[in-house]
Image (spheres, rainbow, N blue to C red):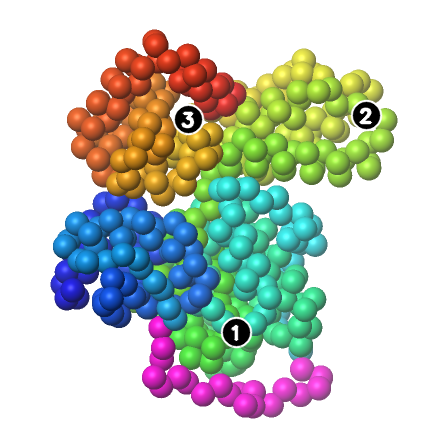
Amino acid sequence: MTNEGWAEIRETLRARVGKDNYITWIEPLKLSALSGGVANFSVPTTFFGDWVKRNFADQILHQLHRSGAEVDRVEFALERNPNPAPKPTEPARKRATDEKEVPGAPLDTRFTFDSFVVGKPNELAHAAARRVAEGGPVTFNPLFLYGGVGLGKTHLMHAIAHELQQRQPELRVLYLSAEQFMYRFVQALRERQVMDFKELFRSVDVLMVDDVQFIAGKDSTQEEFFHTFNALVDQNKQIVISADRAPGEIKGLEERIKSRLQCGLVVDLHPTDYELRLGILQQKAEFYHTQYRDLVIAPGVLEFLAHRISTNVRVLEGALTRLFAFASLVGREITLDLTQDCLADILRASDRKITIEEIQRKVAEHFNIRLSDMIGPKRVRTIARPRQIAMYLSKQLTSRSLPDIGRRFGGRDHTTIMHGVRKIEELMTADSQLSDDLQMLKRLLQG
């Protein structure tokens, strides 16, 4: 198969797996050989190859078959660099014994891996952060974490820094926000200390920059960030970046910076699901019980909050903080009635809006299939039926149009969605098990 053939397959996969998955997992793949029924791909890291094999190998194999390739399986191996850069044997500059610590933003002692609750929506981000925190050879550079407010980006960055400092105290780990990076650069320009600024930031072992979208549109800061980034990568130093959206979606960010940020591992922290929110509340409640020993929390309260407050973990934790404090002040048990009275404003603002992605995840979990199969091409009944159920629920529980639903199901045509919806409507009247499954899923989604 030619490179042009693989390029055509990649474009098909882009429509099947979605833009973010394509940029993160498919685009970096390089078809290195196709022989003996095996398609061999080069990947940047072992971790990367393992993830693609678990989640996208079937779809890649399917598209290879459709293109006429005689392939039985796909394999992934590390890309070999014929001219690896030699590792520096000495620091770039002499470190005096009285050298000052690199000034960064303070780390929150609460934000550790032990206090981070892991669930399906943040499983990959947590695993990648753990790998970086091990402090071994750099496996992906940079690690780019993105997602909405309160989903755990900053928590994971602080956890990485804490773990690295504990494992290797000699490492120079610098964590700061993009705003602080810009402020220090402007200050260096004003005080004519740009060389000191460059030397400081390029001498660290690990650089962690939070909310990088802040430098978008700020030309001189972007220029310095770009050169700092390149200098650290050339020295094989680890970089961890966070933002509120994927690199390619940050308006005002230079294309060369977007390209650099996408060359590592880009991980999306999805909105939390019910199980993850309940786990966070249970952990938080255990902590508060050490402070409010006399308080009693009635059964069902945590479950109620996990259902009703779904958009933001910070809001969720803040609600529980307020609830415990209020119950302590008035000396009452934390009941469902007290919860609704105390948190009326938060509950009104947190009325749940069910998303197609949430429906897909919940249905995939219920029927024990992979999420990638939900939007993939497989037509076996064990996958096709749950997919149709998810299509039906998307039509019933969201206001999305049929073409929009089709796009969320791997780029399917709206007529395919109509067929799936009608099929479930026909079956549910005669199939009691299907009807029970639908009712259970609706309860889980609607809270």
Viewer-side label of 2, 1:
1
Residue 91 within the segment the image draws in magenta: yes
Q: Which residue is depicted at the point 27% across and 56% down? A: 72
Does residue 397 appear anywhere in the picture? Answer: yes
CA–CA distance between discs 2 and 1? 48 Å
- Mark 2 / mark 1, whichever is N-terminal: 1
Q: Is residue 21 above or below residue 431?
A: below
Secondary element under disc 1, as helix, strand or loop, is: loop
- Check disc 1 and report the residue beneath it: 137
- Answer whether labels 2 and 1 touch (C-beta < 8 Å): no
**Does residue 248 appear to the left or right of 332 in the view shown?**
left
CA–CA distance between discs 2 and 3? 33 Å
Camera-side residue: 16 or 125?
16
- Mark 2 / mark 3, whichever is N-terminal: 2
Q: Taken as a whole, is the magenta stretch helix, strand or loop?
A: loop
Residue 52 within the segment the image draws in magenta: no
Secondary element under disc 2, as helix, strand or loop, is: loop
Which amino acid lies under the numbered mark 2 shown in the image of this protein? Leu
Please give the count of numbered marks on the rendered protein.
3
Q: Which residue is depicted at the point 51% across and 58% down? A: 128
Secondary element under disc 3, as helix, strand or loop, is: loop
- Check disc 2 and report the residue beneath it: 295
Q: Looking at the rendered structure, which numbered label has been put on residue 392?
A: none
CA–CA distance between discs 3 and 1? 41 Å
Quarter residue 101 falls in: bottom right
Which amino acid lies under the numbered mark 3 shown in the image of this protein? Ile
Expressed as whole percent of the image width and height from the top left, the position of residue 354 reads: 42, 26
- Check disc 3 and report the residue beneath it: 354
Expressed as whole percent of the image width and height from the top left, the position of residue 247 reads: 36, 56
Q: Quadrant of the N terminus?
A: bottom left
In this view, which residue lies farthest toward the right? 294
